[in-house]
Structure formats: structure tokens, C-alpha cells
Amino acid sequence: MVRWRAMTLTWLLPQTDSIPEEKAAAVLRHAAARRPDDGTLRLRLARVLYARDCQQEIVDLLAPLVARDDAPEEACLHYGRALLRLGDPHGAIAALRRAGETTGTLADAYFDSGRTDDALTAALEMLAQQPDERRSLSVASKVLLARGATRTLLDLCRDLRSRGGRNAEIDALLALSAWAQGAPECDALLDRRRFAQIDDLRDAAFNAALAGEILAHPLLERSPGYKATRGDGVRIDHIGRHGGPLAQALLADIQAHIETYAAARAIDLPQTVKLASWALVLRGDGHETWHIHPAARISGVYYVQAPERAGEIGFGPLRPVADRDMTDFPSWTLTPRAGMLLLFPSHFAHRTWPTLTDAPRISVAFDVMPAQES
């Protein structure tokens, strides 16, 4: 029997950009070139460039600021983060330490440089202060799982939850370490019958029109390297903000389904939430690697167009455990079809397989997030 609870969600409306990111970057580039000594302008441009994955440009832009003895901490922070994404963890460590970095980015840089003991120490120190710091937990888990220390990871995740930590990273790693230790949390967190919901939402005519709207969208661009997309894939970010009328109609339908889904499963959500959404077009070898949506509570995907019997989505372990056979981990796959809406908790680790066809696999993916999340 489904048990319903009273739920009144307030959906935070997407904010309309006063100027699109691409145009903002162009304007700021021009201004910074005309005023090369204006450090404030350079920092504003760096913030926009980081979101657009222009890491080498950030390094070139901020190098003069970072070279100064009185370099602003924010300049060192953006410089270090860019170096880390460019594969220079040693340079990133130096810059991030100058910035007084207190998030998991420094732990990440230690890990990428091979200093796993320092990475684990930095990550655990941060988690002792902030049980919700996702990047630190990600680093700690990579070190502990590589060492086969699943008991330590299980105790860590339990401790974070006991201190108020609530995010998908904690739940995914709690499920993984609980599975390795034979603890009950795994079954409770990965119950497919309870948590996965599949609905048929829209008809073929609507999907064909929406596919045309997405494929003709001026903001369709290649997915940045730090996303899970690999191979032939393009996307439209913030489709709730930038999408056309058909995308907006679809998102309104999705919100209604989310409210029913969350109420039926007594999922704990804050009263005020927002829907982050994006469109993804994959062809040929395009696919998504294993990932979760760590900042979200509920995630999902609507299939606008799906090649027949191709492009499966699979659910399974977030990360492997050293020297462990993972075939018994709760795992399942689903073949998408046009018009299908799939909802699941954001801690469900998932991936997709390439379609190996020229026909596009078009989807609209989304996250339900606390309103304060970035």
C-alpha cells in the first residue's frame, strides 16, 4: 500500500540571465584587454570562464595576479582549480595553499599528485568540520576503497549522517561500503522496486516537435570535459532558463510527477527546491560514464528520442572495491524508449551505453535540488 504524506513544495523559478554566459565572457574579455591592470575585472572573467571550462585561458589570465606577493586569495583559488583540471596537481597544490583553500579541491590535488596519505588527511580534516563537503568525501572514498578499507568508509558515512550530512555522495558510498560489509543500509538505499519509477509521459507528435526544438537551439554545444559525457555528445545547459516553449511544457509535467513520486515514497525534501535541467544529444560512441548527481535529492531523465534497442542506461556501484568481485552488487539496466520518464534517487550510480548509430538519442535530464545549492 502506498502511504502518502502531506507535501507542499515551493519551486524556485529559474533566474533569467541578464546576459548569456557566452556574451558575458566576450564583454569581459574585451574590458580586461582594455584595462590589463584591473584585477577585479580579471577575477570576474575567471568566474565565467571556469563555468565554461576555459581552464588554460584562466591560467593565462590570472598568472600576472598570482605572480604578485600580495596575490588575492580568490585569484590563487581559481588559478589552482584551473591547473588541477589541466592535469597539473603539483602547481594546483601550491596555488590552493596560498589561497587558504578549505574545501575538497586541495585534497583532490593531493590525490592526483599521488600523495594519497596527504589527500586522506586533508579530506578527513574537512569532513570533521563540514559533514556535507562532497568533494572531500569523494577523495576519502577513493583512497579507502583502493585500500580495501570498506569498514572505515562505512563508519565514516554513518558518522557523517549522524552529524547531519545529507547528500547523494554520502548515500551512494554508504550503500557501497554497506554492501561490502554485509550491512543492512545497502538494501534500504538501493531498493529498485521502491525508488525507481517509470512513466509514459508524452506522445510521438510532441516528442518529434520537441526534438526539432532542441536540435535547432542556438545554445547546443559540446559537453565540457568535466561532465560525465564522453564521445559524440552535445548539450543545452539550464534548459529551464533557455529552453523553448515545448521544453517548458515538458518541465511543468515533470515537476508534477516529481511531487507525486516524492510524496508516495516519503522522500525527505526541503520545502523550497529547484529543478536543474539540461538537454543531451548523443550519437554513435556518445555515452555517459559512471556517476551520481551529488548535489541533488531526486534525479531523472525524459527520453525525447531513442534509437530502438540501443543506448541502455545501467545502475550499479559508484566505484569498485579493491580485490572484490562486484557482480553481486545490486545492478540493473533499462532500454529507453521515446516518451518514457524515469525517476530515481540521486544517489543511484548510473551510466549509459553508446547507441552506435547516427540517429540521435535525445533526452532531457534533471535534478531536484535544495534551493540554496549552486
Image (cartoon, helix red, strand yellow):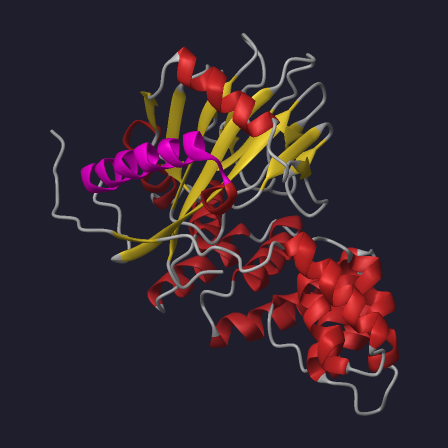
- Quarter occupied by residue 76: bottom right
Q: How many marks?
A: 0
Whole-percent x and y of residue 116?
A: 72, 62
Q: Is residue 338 above or below residue 77?
A: above
- Quarter occupied by residue 320: top right
What range is drawn magenta here?
243-264
**Relative side of 221 to 267, left or right:** right
Q: Is residue 246 magenta?
A: yes
Whole-percent x and y of residue 20?
A: 61, 54
Of residues 303 and 217, which is closer to you in this image? Answer: 217
Residue at 51 percent of width and 44 percent of height: 242
Locate the N terminus by quadrant.
Answer: top left
Of residues 106 and 275, which is closer to you in this image? Answer: 275
Q: Is residue 333 visible?
A: no
**Relative side of 129 to 230, left or right:** left
Q: Is residue 368 magenta?
A: no
Q: Is residue 80 visible?
A: yes
The residue sitting at the top extreme is 308
Of residues 199 and 163, which is closer to you in this image? Answer: 199
